[in-house]
Amino acid sequence: AEQHSLLLNSARLFPLPHGMIFSYGTAGFRADGSKLLSTVFRAGVLAALRSLRTGSTVGLMITASHNPIGDNGIKIADPDGGMMTQDWEPSAEALANAPDPQSFVELVFSFAKEEGISLGGERSAEILLGRDTRPTGEALLQAAKQGIEAIVGSVALDMGVVTTPQLHWMVRRKNMGVRTSENDYFMQLSESFRCLMNLCPKGIETNGSIDSRLIVDGANGVGGDKLEQLKKLLLGLNIQVRNSSKHGQGILNEGVGADYVQKGRVSPCCFGPKDIGLRCASFDGDADRLVYFRISEANSNSIDLVDGDKILSLFALFMKEQLQILNKSDSQGLNDVLISRVGVVQTAYANGASTDYLKKLGLEVAVTPTGVKYLHKKAAEYDIGFYFEANGHGTILFSEDFLIKLQGKSNDLAFSNAGSESHKAALRLLAVSKLINQAVGDALSGLLLVEAVLQYMGWSLQNWIELYDDLPSRQLKVKVADRSAVITTNAETQVLQPYGLQEAIDFETGKYHRGRCFVRPSGTEDIIRVYAEASSQEAADSLARSVSHHVD
Ligand code: 16G
Ligand code: ZN
């Protein structure tokens, strides 16, 4: 009874705004930040239920990533640091849209019963809260806290202003029973980075082609500020942060950030002719996306983009090489070969040239629908699973089982063959597993891994760009009355409905050499997206244009 009235009284403080319908999309709830108080309060309640149900700590992050500064959003992180299980999304939506406090409370009780959660019981819930730099973040955080505290025995721990990947990392670590502070995060990243740098082959730095200078666009968000802190712990890199939320007068995600750079293929604000030829990188507003770029020699308004596909390819090449080195010496019978299932996961947006490249490396390539939750789940099926979206969101996952074997092997080698090439390869693989965020894609750790790998290879940005040539592509958006009218299948590569649209796409695509085209409803905006690829830019443009007329 106490629980019932506590919940009801709290819910009354957060009435549902008129005429809004909230959906738990690709990346949680998103809307105008001023309209989200009830949603965030209710998500706080749900997070507490999730924690009770799993008996573990969960996370709640308040961010709208690369969206404009007035927007905000909310995501729940599961105990392993990944996104909340998809089974709970319908309930999240039902709770968010319950028309009044009374029906909300009834829903909470019936859902708890269904899930076997005892409310007001012995068990207590723990939720880590984080937010990005948005002005509505503080008020929303308070609403989330009240939601959590409306479930008897629940505790909210405020992690402050953090990147999305930091919060996911903290949740994961908390449940592993290890230290979770921001300082621990910085220490783990900087130590594993140093370890990788120390294991670089000697003599390469004299090559002269590698420039230690790196300029990073922080999107006027939380990532720039965190990188300023992290870089103090790094040796061997000369990082300059621009558009960091600290001293910039710039506005979050406005003319800056990974989404702006990748979609528009333009340089962000505060980058110009003075930077021609330099290695540049860009984060998005909550620092879970990373792309690299270079201001073109020919035209300082345009850039050479190094997107998520190329980051993925660089990582895959490096890791494959380490596995080969590790296993080569063993074929002489000294040790057992470390068997590993290695796989790469992409979406339909992956440039066709990157997929060809990865297959040529001998890797298995899987395709899933857009959205981290799909890619992550697939990648977790491998011993080493790589995933990246072209937009720069991705990471490398190691299975527990494989890490135990790898550690064991590394220990054996330290005993029998310390300092050998295979021992170094084992140490590098272990360092990567600590550097790269196992919970979710992370621009900070991704950046450090790129830098360490370039250093290891002795590669300039130019060498990396030449890994393969991107096929020309074009993305368009089409405004439609009802985006749900388009239904796709086969990881979004084929249209099921409306009838006849796929035939039209096939017909148009057939006219172009290396043509590939697909359409899908956006999960974050009220539009249909069209993607086309072909052997020339003119052809890709024209294919995208003609298909978008069929969508209209
Ligand atoms: C969200 C997704 C991102 C996806 C994008 C697609 C997460 C954390 N983020 O930002 O992975 O690429 O949506 O947007 O899952 P769209 O559906 O509008 O094309
Ligand atoms: Zn983001």
Image (tube, rainbow, N blue to C red):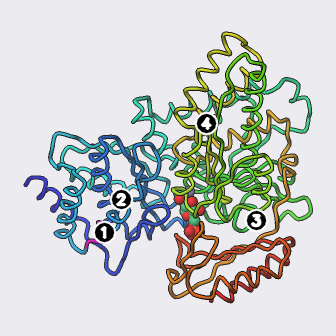
Helix or strand or loop: what does disc 4 sit on? helix
What residue would you read off at disc 1?
94
Residues shaded magenta: 94-98
Q: As shown in the figure, which amino acid type bears the numbered disc 4?
A: Leu
Write down the quadrant of residue 303 in the picture: bottom right
Q: Which mark is residue 230?
A: 4
Write down the quadrant of residue 66 in the picture: bottom right
Which of the pair 18/417 is nearer the observer? Answer: 417
- The majority secondary structure of the magenta stretch comes to helix
Residues at discs 4 and 1 in contact (Cβ within 8 Å): no
Q: Which mark is residue 266?
A: 3
Residues at discs 3 and 4 in contact (Cβ within 8 Å): no
Sequence-first tag of 4 and 2: 2
Q: Which mark is residue 34?
A: none
Q: CA distance from mark 4 to mark 1?
A: 41 Å
Q: As shown in the figure, which amino acid type bears the numbered disc 1?
A: Ala
- Decide if residue 4 is on the left or right side of residue 224: left
What residue would you read off at disc 2?
88
Q: CA distance from mark 1 to mark 3?
A: 40 Å
Choose mark 3 or mark 2, whichever is in front.
2
